[in-house]
């Protein structure tokens, strides 16, 4: 196996281990595209790992900030033709050159990760949306450059919406985990809207206020998924099924939260293997019915 093939194989392993739903969707792509998607995910995962286990101490924050800056310099080097430094770099360089990727979404991702160093609350939805765009919406832009659009069509806005929807879903699923780290991602204006306090959240209070708040956020996420879904016909035909499948599977996490009666403090919502298997043929059928998406 050549060094390049070894690099792609490692990217595949990283994706399969850390992003099971994302990986399942990628398998539905043609081989060149799915390998490129794995290369991007491997970079994203390594970026995310720079912040894993981050505590509140200022010294640790500054160390992590320095690591992010070094990682950013390494990224700039790769886009400028620099030499690979980590095992996944060969796959990423190949992907950058093959699909002529723009560096700006990668830079935005690093800006988003930096926000986690300084921000533990978001006052408004617009504030949170900026964060979601940077850490997830730009992933839609990265992937759409690989998947491609039908000539004359542009689904980048919908691709961004899908990334934001997925990130908001993650936030709702991981409320308890984030609370244990002293973080609240749900906008504070929304807590006030339902007279639910930070203290209530840290005490894991589930009552009518909490359920109304979660229902409000879930509706917001579903609106974003609906917007994203309308962009699927703009994609190249060989990319529609995996995107439709990923959208369906991730949206089902919201259903799981509801089935758990909004208990996200101690129970992690997930989509069962059976549900994933059943979703694939449905996604395939829908991805071939353009009128399903309003066209």
Image (cartoon, rainbow, N blue to C red):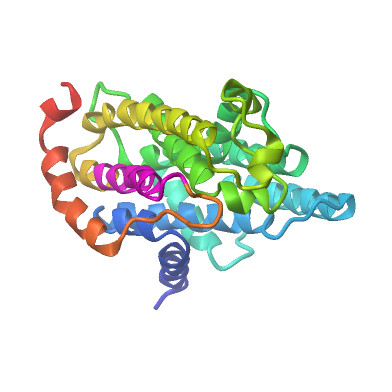
Q: Is residue 78 above or below residue 2?
A: above
Which is the main secondary structure of the residues drawn in magenta? helix
Based on the picture, tell me whether residue 252 belongs to the magenta stretch. yes
Question: Which quadrant would the C terminus be assigned to in this image?
Answer: top left
Based on the picture, tell me whether residue 181 belongs to the magenta stretch. no
Q: Is residue 289 above or below residue 19?
A: above
Residue drawn at (66%, 48%) of the image: 179
Q: Which residues are magenta?
A: 244-262
Task: Please tell me which residue lies in front, 29 or 55.
Answer: 55
Residue drawn at (62%, 37%) of the image: 185
Q: Is residue 224 above or below residue 8?
A: above
Q: Is residue 196 above or below residue 10?
A: above
On the image, the x and y values in percent for residue 214 come to 48, 35
Residue farthest to the right? 59
Judge from the rendering whether residue 41 lies leftward or rightward of residue 33; answer left or right: right
Task: Please tell me which residue lies in front, 186 or 132.
Answer: 186
On the image, the x and y values in percent for residue 13 come to 43, 69
Q: Is residue 81 visible?
A: no
Q: Is residue 288 visible?
A: yes
């Amino acid at each position: 196996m050549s060094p390049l093939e070894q690099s792609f194989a490692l990217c595949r392993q990283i994706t399969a281990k850390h992003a099971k739903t994302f990986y399942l969707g990628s398998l539905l792509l043609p081989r060149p595209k799915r390998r490129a998607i794995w290369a991007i995910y491997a970079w994203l995962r390594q970026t995310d790992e720079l912040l894993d286990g981050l505590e509140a101490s200022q010294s640790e924050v500054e160390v992590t900030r320095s690591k992010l800056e070094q990682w950013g310099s390494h990224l700039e080097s790769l886009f400028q033709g620099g030499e690979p430094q980590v095992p996944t770099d060969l796959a990423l360089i190949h992907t950058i050159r093959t699909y002529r990727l723009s560096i700006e979404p990668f830079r935005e991702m690093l800006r988003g990760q930096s926000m986690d160093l300084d921000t533990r609350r978001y006052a408004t939805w617009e504030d949170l949306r900026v964060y979601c765009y940077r850490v997830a919406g730009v992933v839609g832009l990265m992937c759409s450059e690989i998947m491609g659009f039908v000539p004359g069509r542009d689904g980048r806005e919908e691709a961004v919406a899908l990334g934001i929807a997925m990130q908001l879903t993650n936030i709702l699923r991981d409320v308890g985990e984030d609370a244990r780290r002293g973080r609240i991602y749900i906008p504070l204006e929304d807590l006030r809207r339902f007279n639910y306090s930070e203290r209530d959240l840290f005490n894991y209070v589930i009552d009518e206020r909490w359920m109304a708040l979660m229902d409000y956020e879930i509706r917001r996420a579903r609106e974003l998924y609906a917007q994203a879904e309308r962009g699927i016909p703009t994609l190249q035909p060989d990319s529609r099924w995996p995107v439709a499948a990923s959208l369906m599977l991730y949206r089902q996490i919201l259903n799981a939260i509801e089935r758990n009666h909004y208990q996200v403090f101690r129970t992690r919502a997930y989509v069962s293997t059976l549900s994933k298997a059943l979703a694939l043929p449905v996604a395939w059928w829908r991805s071939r019915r353009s009128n399903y998406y309003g066209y």
